[in-house]
């Protein structure tokens, strides 16, 4: 179950195209990473129009995607299916660029 409502608002509802209301038992590796490393993250922290440029992709793969259950079960982004990355990917890229 997702930890707190503010994470769902900031990560899932705010940025993830795959988010579905009522599926709170499902969460990706980026959700896990953000809740562990950025406990104060709130909706509105990251500009809502931020688009990833994938410049941090190797780092995100190593630190985040490698712990994601969806990578094992099939990640359209990582499998090259042309789907966008999860919303957490976008947030993590922005956060890593901020230092």
Image (tube, rainbow, N blue to C red):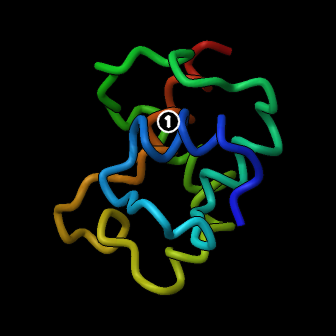
With respect to residue 50, does 84 lie above or below? below
Q: Quadrant of residue 87?
A: top left
**Which residue sits furthest front?**
22
Q: Which residue is drawn at 57% across and 63% down?
A: 28
Q: Residues within 10 Å of mark 1 (few under 14, many from 20)?
A: some
Would you say 53 lies left or right of 13 here? left
Would you say 53 lies left or right of 98 here? left
Q: Mark 1 points at which residue?
A: 56
Q: Residue at x 57, y 61 (%)?
A: 65
Q: Could you tell me residue 77's position as x and y percent?
A: 32, 63
With respect to residue 62, does 5 lie above or below? above
The quadrant of the image that shows the N terminus is bottom right
Q: Which residue is drawn at 68% across and 67% down?
A: 67
Q: Could you tell me residue 37's position as x and y percent?
A: 80, 37
- Front residue (pair 62, 88): 88
Would you say 79 lies left or right of 86 here? left
**Which residue sits furthest left?**
82
Q: Which residue is drawn at 17% across and 62% down?
A: 82
Q: Could you tell me residue 15's position as x and y percent?
A: 39, 39
SS class, disc 1: loop
- Front residue (pair 27, 5): 5
């Amino acid at each position: 179950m997702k930890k707190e409502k503010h994470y769902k608002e900031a990560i899932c509802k705010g940025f993830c195209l795959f988010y579905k209301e009522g599926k709170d038992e499902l969460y990706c590796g980026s959700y896990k990473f953000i809740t562990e490393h950025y406990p104060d993250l709130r909706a509105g922290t990251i500009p809502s129009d931020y688009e990833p440029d994938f410049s941090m992709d190797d780092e995100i793969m190593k630190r985040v995607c490698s712990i994601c259950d969806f990578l094992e079960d099939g990640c359209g982004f990582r499998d090259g299916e042309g789907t966008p990355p999860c919303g957490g990917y976008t947030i993590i890229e922005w956060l890593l660029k901020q230092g």
